[in-house]
Image (cartoon, grey):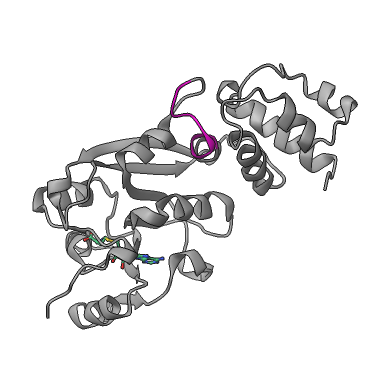
Amino acid sequence: MIIKAKKSLGQNFLKDKNVLKKIADKSLLNNSAELIEIGPGTGNLTDYLIKKNPKKVFLIEKDEELSKYLKNKFFDKIKVINKDILKFFDYEIFNKNTIVIGNLPYNISSQILVKFILDNNFKYKALIFMFQKEMADRILAEVNSKNYGRLSILSNWKFDIKKLFDIKPSSFEPKPKVESSLLFFSEKVDKINLKNPKSLELITRILFNQKRKKIRKSINNIFKKNNKIISDLNLNLDLRPQNLDLKTYCNIASKYDSEKIS
Ligand code: SAH
């Protein structure tokens, strides 16, 4: 059976055997772990991951043609789920031994990551996701740097993040235009407590929409010019969104929640 890659579904299949093996070796999979793979494609990576003998394997693949192909290729132990990960809410297949792995479709990779950041119902031990290198750099960026933004703040609120390695376009078929990076995420044990993480998403979205402007105007908008609340936050309103650290963003989000501004 010949499978033609669909651009609309971000299909870039990993072909390089050394890279596939390296990912499996870094995956922490063993016979007490469970695997959920997002976007398994033709199962190239899956072949290497199952060599680590995970207890259970679930493959979540949106493409119907590929899902049929995968059902034929693998046996009973592997459950193929033909669904869109962005509309996936079957929490019961996730648990604290689950390792979630994906060579993600690049057009929706940040949406997938944000879903795992904001939805607390997914349980897992680690996420291992592939991104375009430029997006990985944004996820890993530190405050006051050029790449620092919403993704850095949201990801760093929830996770300890490590870059495992970069991968060249020639390792894929079809070849993407840019380099890729594989990142490892584990949930922070000392995460800043937020009543409603969606508020952090909202606040960072509003502020970074005016990325080069001083924060004064956005903060005034968010808090409806309520001077008491704004002065409580003790912010320097002449700073720009890239100058505020994670703790400051969490303070703003918590204030927004506690004041019930709508
Ligand atoms: N893991 C494979 C394929 C990666 S390409 C490999 O490394 O070779 C990305 C895969 O994600 C494709 O198989 C594509 O069909 C699938 N995909 C795209 N959008 C998806 C979505 N919303 N939910 C689940 N899978 C999706």
Q: Is residue 149 magenta?
A: yes
Image position, residue 28 (x, y; %): 29, 49
* Left or right: residue 81 compared with residue 253: left
Image position, residue 173 (x, y; %): 15, 58
Q: Is residue 171 magenta?
A: no
Query: Can the viewer see residue 118?
Result: yes
Kindly indicate the quadrant of the structure image that contains residue 153. top right
Instruction: Name the quadrant of the N terminus.
Output: bottom left
Kindly indicate the quadrant of the structure image that contains residue 100. bottom left
Taking the spot 27% from the left edge, 80% from the top edge, the residue there is: 65
> Above or below — where is 239 with respect to 105?
above
Taking the spot 58% from the left edge, 35% from the top edge, the residue there is: 208
Image position, residue 144 (x, y; %): 51, 20
Instruction: Between residue 190 and residue 243, name the one nearer to us.
Output: 243
Kindly indicate the quadrant of the structure image that contains residue 245. top right
* Left or right: residue 86 compared with residue 237: left
Image position, residue 191 (x, y; %): 58, 37
Instruction: Between residue 109 and residue 18, name the one nearer to us.
Output: 109
Q: Which quadrant of the figure shows ligand 1?
A: bottom left
The residue sitting at the left extreme is 17
Which residue range is magenta in the image? Answer: 145-153
Taking the spot 33% from the left edge, 69% from the top edge, the residue there is: 59
Q: Count the labels in the image.
A: 0
* Left or right: residue 68 compared with residue 195: left
> Above or below — where is 243 with respect to 98?
above
Query: Can the viewer see residue 21?
Result: no
> Above or below — where is 98 with respect to 194?
below
